[in-house]
Amino acid sequence: MTAATLDTFARPLKHLRVSVTDRCNLRCGYCMPEAEYAWLPRPDLLTFEELVWLADRFASLGVESVRLTGGEPLVRQGLSSLVQQLSARPWLRDLALTTNGVLLAEQARALKDAGLKRLTVSLDTLVPSRFKALTRRDSHGAVLEGIHEAARVGFPGGLKLDTVLLRGVNDGELVPLLDFAGLVNAELRFIEYMDVGGATQWRREAVVSRAEVLERLTQAFGRLEPLPGRGAAPAERFRLPDGRTFGVIASTTQPFCGACDRARVTADGTFFTCLYAATGLELKSALRRGDGAEALEALLRDRWTGRRDRGAEARLSLSARGPLATTSQLKREPRLEMHTRGG
C-alpha cells in the first residue's frame, strides 16, 4: 500500500474524481440553468489511455479509489473500455460512476462486465412533469428504466440514488423517493443545493438543510438512528425504524472540509484540489509533451502537499452569500462549472 500524501491540514489524498466529458444531455436548473455554455475543445479531452496513465500517477500519491463523472459520463463513447482499463489496475480498491441515468439502460450490463463496482444515479423527482421542468428534457422514463436495469444487473458495491433538494420544487417528495429507493434496493442520499460552479441562480432560501430533512423524516417515520463509520465520506448516514438507510450530504450548511480526501481532474486534464477552487493545475501539456512519470508525480505532490482548501467552510462564513461565479466568469473559464469539474 502506498503511503498517504498529506496536505497542510494532514488530509490524505485517497479518492480521485475523473471527469470524462463536460457535455451533458440534461439541463438541470441547479447545475446548468443558462441557455448557452462554453465547451472544452474536443481535441483537448484526454484519451482513455491518458486518463489511465494519469490515474496511475495519482495512485503513487496514495489514491486507491476512482469515481468517473462528467458532465454526463455515459455520453462519452466507449466508456466501458475505460472502466475495463481502470478496473485492471492493481492499486485500485474501488471504481464508481455517477450518471443522470438517461443512457444507463443500454450500458449498465457492459459497465458491470467491465468491472464497475458501484453506481450512483441522480434522481430528483418521481413526477415526469417536474422532471421536465427541472431538466428541460423529456427523459424521465429513460432514467427510471436505467435505474431498474441497474438494479437488475446488480453492482457488487451497490446502487445509490442522489436527490438535490430545492425548496418549493421537490422537497415534498422525501418519503416517496425513499420508498422508490427501497423498491430498487438502493440507498437514497439527499443533497443540499450548493452555490458552486454553474449554480448562477442559487439562493439561500432555496436550500433545504440537513436539519430540516431530518426533522421531516423524524415526523414521518419516528426516531432516526445515526450510523457510525462515516470517515471521509460526504454523506452522513441514518437508519429508519424499519431498517432502511439513507444519507444526507450537507455541503452547504455543515461542510466536511476537515475530512476531505478528494482530488478532481477535468476531462482536459486540469487538477483541482477543491470543488470551490478558483484555479487548477493544468497537466495536459506536461503529459502530451512526454514528461515522465516522476515529473508528473512531483507536480501532483507539490500541489497536494501545499493544499489549504476549505472552500465550503469559507462559503459558510460569508454574511452575504450568493452564487460562486457569474455567467460572464463561467464563459471565460468553463472549468469553474460543476459539469466540467465533475461535482
Image: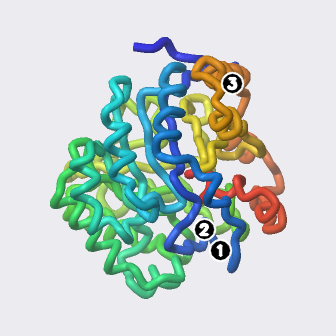
Residue 206 falls in which quadrant of the image? bottom right
Q: Are marks 1 and 2 in contact (CB under 8 Å)?
A: yes
Q: In what quadrant of the picture does the N terminus appear? A: top left
Instruction: Residue at 31%, 46% (x, y): give it.
Output: 118
Q: Point out residue 129 in the picture as x, y percentages from the top left corner.
A: 43, 87
**What residue is shown at x 67% (from left), y 60% (from top)?**
41
Residue 118 position (above or below residue 41): above
State the separation of the CA atoms marked 2 and 3. 34 Å
Residue 181 placement (x, y as % from top left): 27, 62
User: According to the image, label 2 marks what residue?
Assistant: 30
Query: Label 1 is placed on what type of residue?
Result: Pro
Apparent side of residue 238 relative to residue 185 in the rendered image (left or right) = right
Task: Report the side of 23 relative to 243 (left or right).
Answer: right
From the viewer's perspective, is residue 13 above or below residue 29? above
Indicate which disc residue 299 carries. Answer: 3
Secondary structure state at the residue bearing disc 3: helix
Q: Is residue 218 visible?
A: no
Q: How packed is label 3: few (under 14 Cα within 10 Å), some, or many (20 or more)? A: some
Task: Report which quarter residue 198 is drawn in.
Answer: bottom right
Question: What amino acid is found at the position of numbered circle 3 in the picture?
Answer: Leu
Q: Which mark is residue 33?
A: 1
Per the image, label 1 sits on a secondary structure element best described as loop
Q: CA distance from mark 1 to mark 3?
A: 35 Å
Indicate whether 18 appears above or below 323. Answer: above
